[in-house]
Structures are given as C-alpha cells and as structure tokens.
Image (tube, helix red, strand yellow):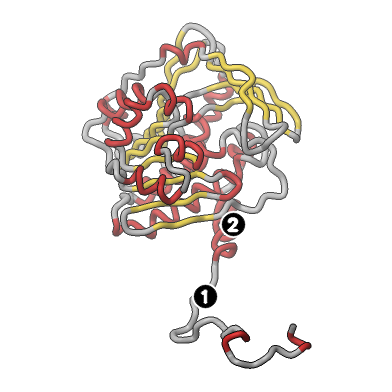
Amino acid sequence: MTDPSILVVGSVAYDSVASPEGERTEQLGGTAVFSSIASGYLTRPGLVGVVGTDFRDEDVAMLKNHGVDVSGLEVADGNTFRWAGSYVDDLNMAVTLDTQLNVFETFNPTLSSDHAGTPYLFLGNINPDLQLSVLHQMSPRPRVVACDTMNLWIDIKKEPLTQLIDLVDVLLINEAEAEQFTGEASMVNSAASLLHHGLKLLVIKRGEYGAAVFHGSFSFAVPAYPMARVVDPTGAGDSFAGGFMGYLAAVGSGVEDEDAEAIRRATVVGSVMASFAVEDFGVERLRNVTHAEINERFTGFVNLTRFHPLDGGQGLPTPWADTGHEMSDAKR
C-alpha cells in the first residue's frame, strides 16, 4: 500500500449515545475514526490512536476497507476508551453521562518514519501536550497542519493549547469555544483575535448553522445542509475535519491566498461529510455513503447557495419611498 497523504491523530472509542431517535451502546466512535473514514473517501489517511485488547476485529477490518492505514493503531493492555452521552434535551449539546479513559489515559504516540513524513496532518481533539508532541515528531514539517480542540482543554490546558495554535496553520473550533478562548462575544472579533496568533486559516464550526471560514484575505461561510432528520450529532465536527483536510490533501492544496477556491470547496466537502455523519448512529451512515451520494450532495450545496450577482449598474429595485410616488392600494 502507498503511504498515507494525511495523518489523523486522535481518540478511538466505543460510544453509548441517546438521542430523540433512540439509543445505541458500544458503537464505534472517536475523533480519529470519524475523521479518517471521512477523509478516506478523498485520499489515503493514516490513523494514529490507541485501543484496548477488547477492540473488535470487525472494526479494524472496516477501517482497512475504507482505505485507512491502521499501522499506527496501538493495542494496549486494558479496555478501549468509553464515552456515554445524551442529546435527548438538545441535539446541539451533548450531556456527558460517563467517561472512561482506560488505555487512552496513558496514550503517548510515537510516529513511524513513514508517518512522520506525511504531508498533511490533522491533530484531533486530544490533550494539547500530545498534539504538540506529535507535531514536533513530524519531519519535514507538513504542508498543512490543522488542529481541533474543546472547552476542557481551554479550561485546564490553555498555555500548551496557545503554544499549539501559534504553530499550526489551521484551527477548527466551535463558536462557543472561540468565545471562551478569546473572551470576545462576537464571532468576528473572536476570529480576528485568533488570527493574530499566526493562523493562516480559522474554521469556526456552527453546528446547525454551518461553518464560517476566516482567512487573512477573505471570509467564507457555508450553511448546514437542510436535514429532515438528525439522529446522532456525535461525529459531525470530526467528519467535517476529515472531509475538509481530506479534500486539501487530495488536490494538493495549501492554505495560502492563492488557494482560496480550494479552501471554499474543502469547506463544502467538510459540510457534506458532516451531513452524512448525523443521519444515523455512530459511523453507520458515514461508512456506507457512496461517491455518487457525496457528489450529489455537494451539488446540492452549490444549488443551495447559488445566485447571480447584480448586473453592472443595475442595483436593487428603487424603494417606493424614494420615488416620490405613493404606492397604489393594489401594491400595498
């Protein structure tokens, strides 16, 4: 097999989830799993993570079948990371019911020489100390380094997280976390503050409202795909990251000024992958999506946001109040 073009580092877990659509226990999840499956539809990902001796053979086989290089999946004595959460009261906010770190508690990845040279790196939502450790092992530095984080690390690990943000190219973060990190109530002000850390690109995930991208030379926003039914939002953000970074890796794009169109398309691809992830529990929908469905939904996003600019000099229709004429009763 060829070496991976994107390295995904993060958690591998068994999740138990409750939502208005039902409940599932011991379903495959974790940052590295959702991200690597999503990116696997676009390019060849390598997964770095840790599992226990209880990790199911069929889950390893599924990852391999999706083109994921699992040579970086460490098996340690003990049980795989467990997380339990509920979306019953609010699909936009998980209530954590139980967390068992198990073998993930002592996870300290050491990269192989092949993985250390991967040109694209996504540091999933894990301890910033581990994210920094992985980044320092990369040689040469990847073309694009992206990281994700969460409120916990902002609370208890803000110093190493700040060091990490100073070093990466892309930060993916949700709107509440951006406000928490910067102390700015406005998303625009939060973005400006974060970009001052030297980021080339900031992606603010906005859940049911889509995502906003801030770059030094442009901004871009994409709505969430209109969904008739949301089953399990657990892996949406990680699937977005996998699609976003997977597309950049697939087309060999950076995140400079000249890469603006690729960044826009990557944002839509990320939103496409996130929309599939929420349609079923765990990775069930994401693992079974087809390339035809991905292309069809990408086109759906294009149609959702497409409009023609005003013709030169046309302007908007003149308001009646500005014409000096009264509007007739028929037009009121």
Residue occupying the point 37% across, 51% down: 251
Q: Is residue 155 above or below residue 4?
A: above
Name the foreground residue: 160 vs 80.
Answer: 160
Percent from the top left, x then y, of residue 37?
51, 36
Residue 311 versus residue 248: which sits nearer the camera?
311
| Quadrant containing the N terminus in the rendered view | top left
Residue depicted at 31% across the width and 26% down the height: 132
Q: Residue, x 57% and y 85% (percent of image)?
A: 318
Disc 2 versus disc 1: distance between alpha carbons? 21 Å
Q: Are marks 2 and 1 in contact (CB under 8 Å)?
A: no
Q: Position of residue 38 (x, y in %)?
A: 51, 40
The label shown at residue 20 is none
Q: What is the three-letter code of the residue carrying label 1?
A: His
Residue 283 shows in the view: no
> What is the quadrant of residue 124 in the picture?
top left
Front in this rendered view, residue 177 or 133: 177
Q: Is residue 252 left or right of residue 299?
A: left
Q: How many marks?
A: 2
Q: Characterize the local packing of mark 1: few (<14), some (14-19) or many (20 or more) Cα atoms within 10 angstroms.
A: few
Provide the residue designation for mark 1. Answer: 308
Which residue is labeled 2 in the image? 296
* Residue 274 figure quarter: top right
Q: Residue at the far top: name it.
A: 77
Above or below, 28 against 198 in this view is above
Which of labels 2 and 1 is toward the front? 1
